[in-house]
Amino acid sequence: MEPVLIYDTTLRDGTQGENINFSAEDKIKIAKRLDAAGIHYIEGGWPGSNPRDQQFFELAKKVRFEQARLTAFGATRRPGIKPEEDVNITALLESRTPVVAIFGKSWDLHVKTIMNSTLTENLAMIGDSVSYLKASGKEVVYDAEHFFDGFKESSEYALQTLATAVENGADFIVLCDTNGGTLTFDIETITAEVFKYLKQRFNKSSADRIKVGIHTHNDCGLAVANTITAVRQGAVMVQGTVNGYGERCGNADLTAIIPILRLKMGLECVSDENLARMKNLSRFVSETANIVPLNSRPFVGKSAFAHKGGIHVSAIMKESRAYEHMQPELVGNHRRVLVSDLSGKSNVEYKAKELGIQLGGNGYDSRKIVSRIKQMEQAGYEFEAAEGSFKIMVEKITDQFKPLFDLESFRVVIEKDRDRPCSAHATIKISVDGRKEITAAEGHGPVSALDNALRKALDRFFPQVDAMHLVDFKVRVIDGRDGTAAKVRVVIESRDSDDIWSTIGVSEDIIEASWQALADSFHYKLTKKDEEK
Amino acid sequence: MEPVLIYDTTLRDGTQGENINFSAEDKIKIAKRLDAAGIHYIEGGWPGSNPRDQQFFELAKKVRFEQARLTAFGATRRPGIKPEEDVNITALLESRTPVVAIFGKSWDLHVKTIMNSTLTENLAMIGDSVSYLKASGKEVVYDAEHFFDGFKESSEYALQTLATAVENGADFIVLCDTNGGTLTFDIETITAEVFKYLKQRFNKSSADRIKVGIHTHNDCGLAVANTITAVRQGAVMVQGTVNGYGERCGNADLTAIIPILRLKMGLECVSDENLARMKNLSRFVSETANIVPLNSRPFVGKSAFAHKGGIHVSAIMKESRAYEHMQPELVGNHRRVLVSDLSGKSNVEYKAKELGIQLGGNGYDSRKIVSRIKQMEQAGYEFEAAEGSFKIMVEKITDQFKPLFDLESFRVVIEKDRDRPCSAHATIKISVDGRKEITAAEGHGPVSALDNALRKALDRFFPQVDAMHLVDFKVRVIDGRDGTAAKVRVVIESRDSDDIWSTIGVSEDIIEASWQALADSFHYKLTKKDEEK
């Protein structure tokens, strides 16, 4: 079976996304990861459009890709000149990539109104540019921009632009839904029309050799559906980006398309090993872009296989496919069980086992723990976002909690004079096995001062706290459910060299809530280390 | 033309999403907004499963909905008992909603392996439950859980469960892709099979009256496509959630489906006015859930009509449909141009006029203000959510700001001893027209103490502060873009007897940020009162 070819444009179309910016070095790193993940084509940038992309192609000349074919992107020649006179086309050749992609106009509106040119000249631009690049020894991908919009308004002309690219030797013709407004049904019928037209226009053996690609955008939330629909109609190349990053609502998301092609449609595209790298690839690109990963992202998101409802969890323990449409491990992801007031006994049992806690020793079984969780969540706690505090809470209820330190007292002072910035400092007194320690510290704000002071006090007893630090700090005001004062929920995320964990505190007072979360964070990590010894 | 009925389950299935938690009061607020947006059915919760949902239905008894029909959700009766003996079904009736939705099993795997029951008993459970609820005077929505998975393994049995619900009087039968693993092509053929079966099984006039609904999940990124595909096959009810919130990868996103049905498929569902509320509805739900809105969300996201590429921007100025698949205003959104600061000029002029501020007096015209706003937003401010601070900021830039009071200094002390709760008190010194005032106050936490102290100090000069109070207090940690320490954004909502206003502060220190927002809040209100005199 011929594989469906994966054409990644994260480094070009992906960077059109709001807040997506890569340095040339970032792009090289991502290109290497894409290559290692079995992607067939990597569109690196538009060398004619900006210096950063030019720099990328310079750097890329020194990189040896295992299997991916590096591609430079540009446009057909400008009206009225020869391809060799067009600086953009020259820049494409100077990139020295084995593959070149050029886009041309399929929509008469664009030819006439935007480009102020004629339909005939546009066909010449497509033909000349493709044949020049072929004569220069390139594999040529022809992107038919706005193909579906053009087809809807003037199908004959849109088809003619494709035929021109084919006649001049394009290796691929790619149907683009540039504005992302086309519905799946229309993608289906128009793609079928394209194949019908090509068969009529060319003799059988030529028509059979024509390779069609698909490029979609997600403006209607249909990019993935539109892509797989075109593949089902016969497209053999899929253009998209990692995580669907791209202009407006993004491009087609390869981290969803690849698993669907492979696992649901049974098509060849990447190997099993590479499929299992999908989640890491997704994470790597979001990290490099400094974009918070979308938890709900299909296949690769943190929540993609997370179960909250008690019914679901008990069913999954009997038979995973009851509530999971596939094995998470196939794409490098894993199942997670969330604990909340919507969950039941089985969630708690699953979780307790995972965290290594014995239940029932003091008569507190999973049923009693569930009802305690429900009470606490009613009071504003949320354990699904705070595994660290969940563990400590269960240990406390089941008499398995051994405090490593006790608070004697703390005092935080915040001062401000006129326009000068605030200053915050904290003093804290703790005891560890009867030995007292009192310290003081400053910080950016009261919580940071308290964190620094506690860390300093603990350092004498537990030097490993040096490696821990606060990563994130979330505060939410929650409604006073019983007409009392509003409460504050603080969730703290902490990290050391090899672990990330979350803890929670709830109080009418933000500092009290922060203290609970801070104390839990240190307790969680210090006892965890203990167990591992 | 009969409208496609929109069935919102944000308040039930939506809350299965990771980190989506609503209080009963939140749920009431959202239900009112859904009603005002023209949604036909609102599924409020599962009264049998948790106290919060029970509380919601109690509160809802006092709410008059304009057009939406409130729905309580539950399951078919348990095996071996009568419906009237089932506490869950009793809880449904006690919710006193006009509509009840119950789910039942369509997949033999679930009946046998998970539920340990028989195929015959399952049919009886469906039939008994539907007919009991019909006899109790309810409109009944029957959700066929795992319908598509069940159909794939045993189509005959899956279809039989539907027929049982129909025979017992269900008003709607809803085909659910519970695990979200079904591809669009399969949704199409299986839905067509369902209609074919119903026509064979029932006489024509009965078959024509059967109303079919669709409920999809987004595990393959196909929820929207799967929904509109089922509608095209004849489904007349669409179940989904605002923003697609829901378990794992979420439910079908109504904020995408409604615009597609209306604008792309030409079907009736909500009015033009309500369609134009789509973006605000999306924002309201994400705010209430305290989930950062997804910028790239189709139709309603901040980036959905944002243009970055220079080619696109110049083309759009000639002809908007060249790079926009629809008019953003139809869904209450607007175009944004990311490269040019020209985009904001008219907004600033409009806003300044609304707030009664003269521009340009000191040379600071709207263009310069736009570039200042961009700088401040880059630093973490967000004026869209804080009109009060926007006004003060523009007044400061244009030399029109007259401070009513000046801060001399403040000091906040937070203390905690062992397990006793925190205490917080603040002292503050301000000056008003050269007259000094120093006071102290306590509070629930440092911000509340500071608010109380400031209010007490101002009271001598501005007695109207008595009527003002803090309504909401939101804190978000924002990324340090330049590798500096993380900043905190505080948004405060304040209220008096006839007004609500918001102000903002940004700093590395939460107290400093809170102070900025507090000071702005008092300034905004006190000067506004002044103008009105």
Image: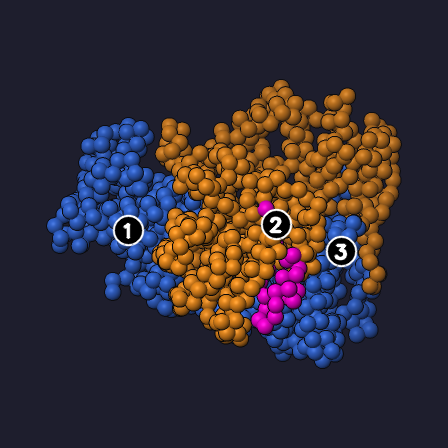
Chain colours: A blue, B orange
Closer-to-camera residue (A103/A4): A4
Q: Residue furthest top?
A: B361
- Locate residue B174 relative to residue B514 in the image: left or right: left
What residue lies at 33% left-to-right and 65% top-to-bottom? A266
Q: Reading the chain from its start, which is encountered first: label 3 or label 1?
A: 1
Task: Give the image location of residue B437, x and y in percent.
Answer: 87, 35
Task: Give the image location of residue B198, x and y in percent.
Answer: 40, 57
What residue lies at 49% left-to-right and 71% top-to-bottom? B120
Q: Which residue is mark 1?
A: A213
Subunit ID for the residue under disc 2? B
Closer-to-camera residue (B456/B370): B456
On whether disc 3 and disc 2 are found on a single subunit, the reply is no
What residue lies at 81% left-to-right and 72% top-to-bottom? A435
Q: How many angstroms separate mark 3 from mark 2 (CA)?
A: 39 Å
The amino acid marked with disc number 1 is Gly
On whether disc 1 and disc 2 are found on a single subunit, the reply is no
Numbered disc 2: secondary structure: loop
Compared to residue B54, the image places residue A372 above or below, namely: below
Q: Which residues, given as a range, are shown in magenta?
A: B69-93
